[in-house]
Amino acid sequence: MLGVAVAIPGVAQASESPLAGAWQLVGYQVQSQGSLKEVPAMGEHPTGRVIFTADHRVAFVLTGEGRTVGKTDAAKSALLNTLVAYTGIEQIDGNQWCTQVQAAWNPEWVGTTQCREFQVEGDRLKVLTPWRHMPNWPGVTRSIITFERDK
């Protein structure tokens, strides 16, 4: 029997990934480039998850601690400051994954490529973003995010 592999443009091809599966958020710190001080910008107990599929899709959702239902337009708008969410196609190269963002909580991210450094230690995933201006807080910052693999 003869097998033929066909690559379809726009469709990620499956391959073994150290990130495949679902990961629960266990820590989120934001570091200021100016002071190098780390702060829990989303609270001491934020919630979230990142899911990597075998066909290289990624869905990333983080929410801040203490979110409540927004009853006014201003309160609903303020909820965006305690949310980070995006999805797209990821590609892994060494200890970096880059996502071609297809949908996001902030329209500025749609169509961009978001890259993250990562390190897997057992069931822990540590993620470090590059220094950047994040829509949620002022100044140049980077995020230090820790996940635990779902069992």
Image (spheres, rainbow, N blue to C red):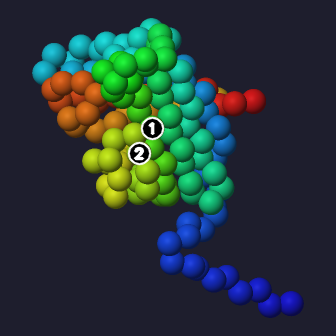
As measured in the structure, the alpha-carbon distance from the residue carrying label 2 to the one carrying label 1 is 6 Å
Q: Is residue 79 above or below residue 51?
A: above
Residue located 60% across and 42% down the image: 51
Residue located 32% across and 55% down the image: 112
Residue located 40% across and 40% down the image: 105
How packed is label 2: few (under 14 Cα within 10 Å), some, or many (20 or more)? some
How packed is label 1: few (under 14 Cα within 10 Å), some, or many (20 or more)? some
Residue 84 left/right relative to 7: left
The amino acid type, in three-letter code, at marker 1 is Ala
In the image, residue 130 lies at what x, y percent? 28, 38
Label 2 sits on residue:
104
Element on which disc 2 rests = strand
Task: State the residue in front, 70 or 103.
Answer: 70
The amino acid type, in three-letter code, at marker 2 is Ala
- Mark 2 or mark 1: whose residue is earlier in sequence: 1
Question: Does the CB distance between marks 2 and 1 fall below 8 Å?
Answer: yes
In the image, residue 80 lies at what x, y percent? 36, 28
Label 1 sits on residue:
85
Q: Is residue 92 above or below residue 146?
A: below
Task: State the residue in front, 113 or 18.
Answer: 113
In the image, residue 73 lies at what x, y percent? 34, 24
Task: Specify the quadrant that holds the N terminus.
Answer: bottom right
Q: Is residue 66 above or below residue 138?
A: above
